Amino acid sequence: MAPMSMAAYSRAPLAPMPPGYPGVGGPPPFGQPPGKERKKRRFPIWARVAVSLFLLLLVVVGGLGGYYYFNLATPVSHIVGQQVTGLKGDEDPNASRNGADILSGSRVNILLLGSDTDQKFPNGQYLAQSDIVITIDPATRKVGMLSIPRDFYINVPGGGMRKLDEAYGLGGVALSRLTIFQDFGIPINYYAWVGLDGFIKVIDTVGGVDVDALHPITDDNYPDDVGNKTGDINAYKRLYISPGPQHLSGPEALEYVRSRHADLVGDFGRSARQQQVLSALKTKLNNPAIIGKLPEISNDLNGYVKTDMQLTDVLKLLNFARSLDPNSIQRLILGPPYSASGVTPTGESVVYPDCTKITPLLAQMFGLGNNARCNIQANSNNNTSSLASASQPSATPKAIPVASTWQAASQVADISAMSIGGSSDNLLGFHSLLDLMFMVVFESPDAMQV
Amino acid sequence: MKSYNTTTIGKSLLLLLLALSVQGCLGIGNNNSSNGPVGNTITTNSSGNKVSVAQNLFKGKIYFTIDHNLWVTDGSSASRELIHGGNVYDPAVSPDGKWIAFIARFKDFTNLAVIPAGGGPLHILLSGNGHFYNDTGVIKNTYYWFAQPAWSLDGTHLLFLSDLQKDFVWYTLGGAFKSSPFLDLQVFSIPFNNPSAQPQAIAYASYGDGGDRDPSYRPAHPQTPEIVYTHYAYDQTGTQQVIQVFLADATAIANHPYTYSPVSDSGVPLTPGSVQNIEPAFSPDGNTIVYVRRDTSNQMSLYVMPVPEGVTADPNSPTVEQKALQPYNKSSHILSGQYVSQPVWSPDGKQVVYVSYNNSEFDLWLANINYNAKTGAYSLQGNPIQLTSGGIDGDSRPFWTP
């Protein structure tokens, strides 16, 4: 390469030097004392280092923020805002709410569905092991919780007389929602569905939990619905959890909190165990080191938690749940005396509702008045149109995602801003989603009280 | 003399601040993350932590489990793994040191098994294997649990916990006893040389709260074979747990048929029902018990108390019950900590090994025990000493032999 000539540096012809410059005639330049060199104006070194550090911090935090946004916002967009197309015969109870806030306007009913989600369902045609309807009257702040046994033998629209848990397997959220509306008259405003494997994954991701088991847990009829590869969806397993301090893996923690037969005091004892596991889990989740695992935890939730609520709705709902006195919640479990075990003509073990006892209770709890009903007979016009209009069963609820990643990111930002202003433990809204999961897994808003 | 101007000092300070910031970001110097190793590394546990054992702190051998593989550590030499992959619980060495009894756990049942202490084939004494079946619409099964074997003083019998009577219907007791299976584990024994013999009930459980735990024979008192155990029950309202340490005549049920039942137990409480006391372990002379008291949800304490004499012959007499509770008032507090549990005396009665929880790990710790002959009180001598680091099983249930 030829050496560069001076002309190459020239962009324009040199202007004549003004007078007063060295070697040029005229007075010295203004403001420059004669004989003194001009000192360069500089920030003090500490200021420059501080600014550099600040900029470095800004880049690092921005980078991390961007990384987490795009790692977390995508899973969040698959969790919240998952609208489900209504089936024929269903109505949209939100239409009359005119877009009101979840905790304002008229009564809100939320259907909580919990499913085992493992390999024994080869086509992903899960059942709903728990069917709970939470009802909130924003005007009075009264909350009710209705637990419907999974073996309730009722009319599933388009499916005939079946167990309630099969409604989910046949038509997902949409058919579960329609079944509860048509059979009991309870309109469902929102739903939240949780796959139990998600809870197990979260516990395992944080390395398990360490608890002091309060007493021996024995259960000879625990549902064998996690990690069961036999294909028997009604299988049982036996539990014996020894008392005392110990480490629990994800499946063990689920067994510890789910067993209903381990206490004379039933749900009270179960609630105490749930509080223990939640407390241990939240201690781990509140550890700053967990930030590095947030993408992993978000993936644990992805596919195992679905709701048509928005992230901000979830946050409001759970904050409301935290403010409740657990003793003020009206709880109704439709076990005996509101139902009785029996066998169908085909030899299937089921639970028969006692409608004369149930209907007035539903009317009172849900403010249904004359709309409360209890249809436990297959309708003569029970054709398969409802079922047919539901899309094919899938591994996850049949949902139409309306929240894009950007929308989810925006909600994450909103939640984070709210967290900074209020409770700082709700990093990127994730504790809200975890709490929603706990509420469904533990089948109780009490999970929020820890 | 060399002088430093303010710019140099400022730069140094800024560099120092920067270094501290980076250190903080990276978590360097954070000693809360894990315990430091206390001795020789023996294995890596399922959490990825290296497990180490301190040497020359005790005499004899201590058996424990890591990821439910059986390990033994010798006070003077190395540690070694005795059983790998067996899902081992509750090791117990025979008095002659020749056999190790333990529990092998499976999904729906457990086996009570032994292996020669010097190595050799495994022998299953009792198998809990079975199957589920449909009994006119009700799902039942033929599986059983066995847990926590403990040897008799002469090594001829083994105590253990089991739900062997789950299908036995106590018609005379009515209520839940008549309508539901009795799943709570109770104390039984079998002859070691004839494990297929009919197991003998030694102590009954209270219905519905999980049953008994931690049974062991009282050493050095062969004239009256007694056992100590934790008894889980509910109060009369059925709403509050009552967890107490019980003492019982090991021959009472066998020698007095139809006298005792789950509502009229052969055991007498040594601790009051108002406080939850668990996991008793006899001292080698059989005169004291170390036990665990639940203070708060995760804080627990070790205590030592004397054993009352002559209280097991008539355990349901109110006078005897009061007498049996007297020594509890002489309990000596030894130490407290998070999840302090499963204490075991050393063969010379001068130390106690126990499990404690620190930095998210369960590990073995040693407490040197001091006895004041004048006051009759026990106390901790010095500070507790960490025996393992890296994390063993929280339900390891250590066993100490000479």
Image: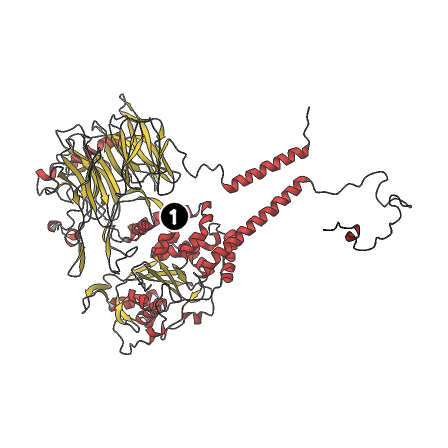
Q: Residue flagged by tag 1: what amino acid is it?
A: Leu
Q: Nearer the viewer, residue A335 or A293?
A: A293
Residue B344 in view, yes or no: yes
**Residue B369 placement, left or right of A73:** left
Q: Quadrant of residue A430?
A: bottom left
Q: Nearer the viewer, residue A236 or A261?
A: A236
Q: Nearer the viewer, residue B335 or A78?
A: A78
| Residue A17 pos. (x, y %) | 86, 49
- Residue B237, above or below A235: above
Question: Looking at the image, which residue sits at the far right?
Answer: A25
**Residue B353 placement, left or right of A292:** left
| Residue B336 pos. (x, y %) | 34, 34
Question: Looking at the image, which residue sits at the far bottom?
Answer: A381
Q: Secondary structure at mark 1?
A: helix
Q: Quadrant of residue A181?
A: bottom left
Color style of the picture: secondary structure
| Residue A149 pos. (x, y %) | 27, 62
Q: So how many labels did they put on this image? A: 1
Question: Looking at the image, which residue sits at the far top?
Answer: B374
- Residue B56, above or below A426: above
**Residue B141 placement, left or right of A64:** left
Q: Quadrant of residue A178?
A: bottom left
According to the picture, the residue beneath numbered tag 1 turns out to be A281
Q: Assess disc 1: are there few (<14), some (14-19) or many (≥20) residues with their C-alpha within 10 Å of its C-alpha.
A: some
Residue B231 in view, yes or no: no
| Residue A152 pos. (x, y %) | 26, 65
Chain for numbered disc 1: A
